[in-house]
Image: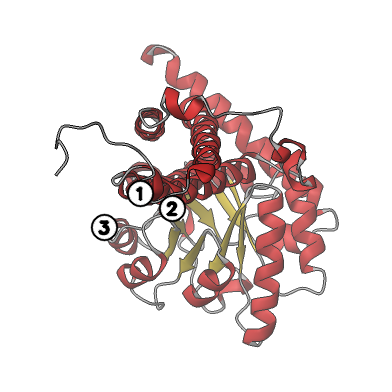
Amino acid sequence: MGDRHEPYRPFPNLPAQAQPAVCRILDANLDRSREGLRIVEEWCRFGLDSTELAGECKQLRQEIARWHTLELRAFRDTTGDVGTELTHPQEEQRAGIEPLLQANLCRVQEALRVLEEYGKLYQPDMGVAFKQMRYRVYTLESNLLGYQRHQKLIRSYLYLVTSASENLFAIVDAALQGGLTLVQYRDKTADDDLRLEAAQKLCQLCHRYNALFIVNDRVDLALAVDADGVHLGQQDMPLALARQLLGPHKLIGRSTTNPDEMQRAIAEGADYIGVGPVYETPTKVGKAAAGLEYVRYAAQNASVPWFAIGGIEPSNLNDVLSAGAERIAVVRAIMQAEQPTLVTQYFLSQLTRLQTLRAFQAHLPQSHV
């Protein structure tokens, strides 16, 4: 029997000629995982100001670094590595922050999987350690994308709810060009195959502009196209069930028409609510307007982002904003506009001006307000 205190020698079952290659694989993927995490960490720190997310990235990097020994680094051969010349066109461009983050999270996950498998050849507990870290990165990805969605929601002041139109995609594209960041696909009459096709196209279109995409009513469609969330009416499935199906990081909105519905939606965990209809609208046939009084109530009592909705157009926008609204949702005002881009820009300019004014007033001494 050997001395139980004899130092552990790596690769007990691996031919000597294969050991340098395995060390190079481990070294390369330790570098790759740490680099990818640092890219994600920088956005969590400077882009999101999230101490929690940045801290998890840093902790993972430090744990990986402890495995990156001088012994492994000694096998590095950058000049002789044939992979340094390999590239792909998709690696040479990024369409936005979210694609950048997802590309680097995928990079980290792939590297950790390589470390998990080849690590089993190097040290007995390395495979277990990197398996656990890989699952932590999956959780980090989910938390990060959920955080991103909620931050986008908070920064979205104009919400387009679509209606059936032959020019649906052109109208939405035009509104997105105008700066729109939140779109809901709503179609109560089309067949499911057509709805699925439309939802897929709209989801891709919105994400190309780094905008949120929500599906009206249908949790199954939202899941099928990987939408950012779902919007539920009062007669749709319970919010708790939708949350169970969608998971904790997707957005769920709820339509409300009175204070009781609003408080119930907030208590059930809605991420945002619709407040209205402010004015009578053909979108809600037979439903009486909730009026500006409900807008005033929401301004005083809503604890989640809320959107005034129902018959809002440029001619009555100031009345809605004067009642306390900061965010609005529109259908016809954009869907039936001759120039959707310009109408979108007008709404956003008025909403942004309001935000600036209210922020200025909030910093004034009370006697000057």
| Disc assigned to residue 127 | 1
Q: In which quadrant of the rendered image does the C terminus lie?
A: top left
The single residue placed furthest to the front in the displayed view is 1
Give residue 367's position: percent from left, percent from top. 38, 12
Which element is circle 3 on?
helix
Q: Is residue 323 visible?
A: no
| Disc assigned to residue 57 | none
Nearer to us in this view, 111 or 275? 111
Residue at 58% in and 32% down: 354
Residue type beneath disc 3: Ala
Residue type beneath disc 1: Gly
| Disc assigned to residue 267 | 3
Q: Assess disc 1: are there few (<14), some (14-19) or many (≥20) residues with their C-alpha within 10 Å of its C-alpha.
A: many
Q: Is residue 356 visible?
A: yes
Give residue 112's position: percent from left, percent from top. 46, 46
Direction from residue 97 to residue 27 in the image, left or right: left
Which element is circle 1 on?
helix
Q: CA gap, disc 1 to disc 3?
A: 44 Å
- Disc with the residue nearer the chain's start (1 vs 3): 1
Direction from residue 317 to residue 290 in the image, left or right: left
